[in-house]
Amino acid sequence: MQIGPYQLKNQLIVAPMAGVTDQAFRNLCLRYGAALAVSEMLSSNPEVWDTDKSRQRMTHSGEEGIRSVQIAGADPELMAQAAQFNVEQGAHIIDINMGCPAKKVNKKLAGSALMQNPPLVKEILQAVVAAVEVPVTLKIRTGWEPEHRNGVQIAQIAEDCGIASLAVHGRTRQCMYRGNAEYDTIKAIKQNVSIPVVANGDIDSPEKARFVLDYTGVDALMIGRGAQGRPWIFREIQHYLDTGNKLAPIEVAEQRQVMLEHLTKLYDLYGEYKGIRFARKHIGWYLDQEDQRQFRADFNQLETAAEQYSLVEYYFDELVKN
């Protein structure tokens, strides 16, 4: 798949997820075979660009691969300025968020709320595309609510405005993350535009990846929650797409190495206080089985990085013994 001048090495993209796809997580996914990892959403409001959270989200020093930065907002001029600012900070691609269903985003008429206002969508897309020389991509949902799936209309506007590629989550804003993603609308979008289309939503296994590619005819897949606690899913999917065979499960020693490295990167990125709190979330995803409940409870009580790191080491030492 081609995005402007950038040729992706395969069809697998990491979805932008607030509080998840920081630099540490993106680099892990890229190492395990993702062709592109889109950063966490950044507000177009310049008043928040100098906060610790925004500075951490804008950190790309030492990052591997193509740097795609997602911006969110509802004011065309501010969105254009945000795009320019992030290109100056090193973004290779600007991604526009019109898919986030969160109330705090939608109450500002940003995210998926914009799908209710196609004329404003057009204004924003035109402003951002005109403001930067790098490719601009767009992420949407299928519509605002099941009775108003206007994804095809928004996709056609995007193509007319010069959007380089379009990612579509197979739910409406009203659906949030409930129920099952539907791919009929994504298939219809692919059939009605000529720009690359990326399918997103509930792609959590190699078999599901193959099905969605075949059913929708899209150019690539975007994987979000399926990669939480499982960054190696990209390797598993690519192997299945290439061979038709499932890859053997990740070995315990490799999983141990990944988790310990992830912890270290979180502490380095956020500092100890915030790092150990982000670590609780990620470790909960890595070890989410019923028989690991007590470990998660113990881990979440720890207040130092050294204790967290040592407990994960102990967990795997005991696992190997047994």
Image: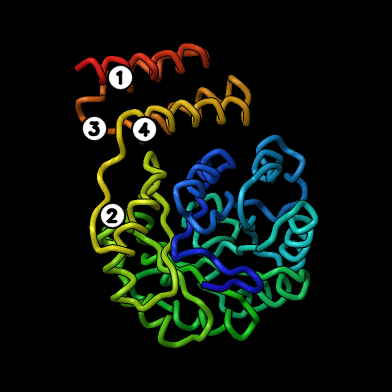
For numbered disc 3, what is the local secondary structure?
Answer: loop
Upstream in sequence: badge 2 or badge 1: 2
Residue position marked by numbered label 4 in the rendering? 255
Whichever of callouts 3 and 4 sits on the residue coming sooner in the sequence is: 4
Residue 173 in view (yes/no):
yes
Q: Is residue 313 positioned above or below 254 on the image?
A: above
Q: Is residue 129 above or below residue 29?
A: below
Residue 148 visible in the picture: no
Gap between marks 2 and 1 measured at Cα: 26 Å
Q: Nearer the viewer, mark 3 or mark 4?
A: 4
Label 1: which residue? 295
Check disc 1 and give the amino acid type: Phe
| In the rendered image, the vertical position of residue 215 relative to residue 65, given as above or below | below
- Disc 2, disc 1: CB below 8 Å? no
Determine the residue positioned at 74% across, 54% down: 90
Give residue 107's quadrant in the image: bottom right
Marking on residue 205: 2
Q: Position of residue 184 (x, y in %)?
A: 31, 77
Q: Residue at x 30, y 55 (%)?
A: 178
Q: Position of residue 214 (x, y in %)?
A: 30, 75
Residue that badge 3 annotates: 289
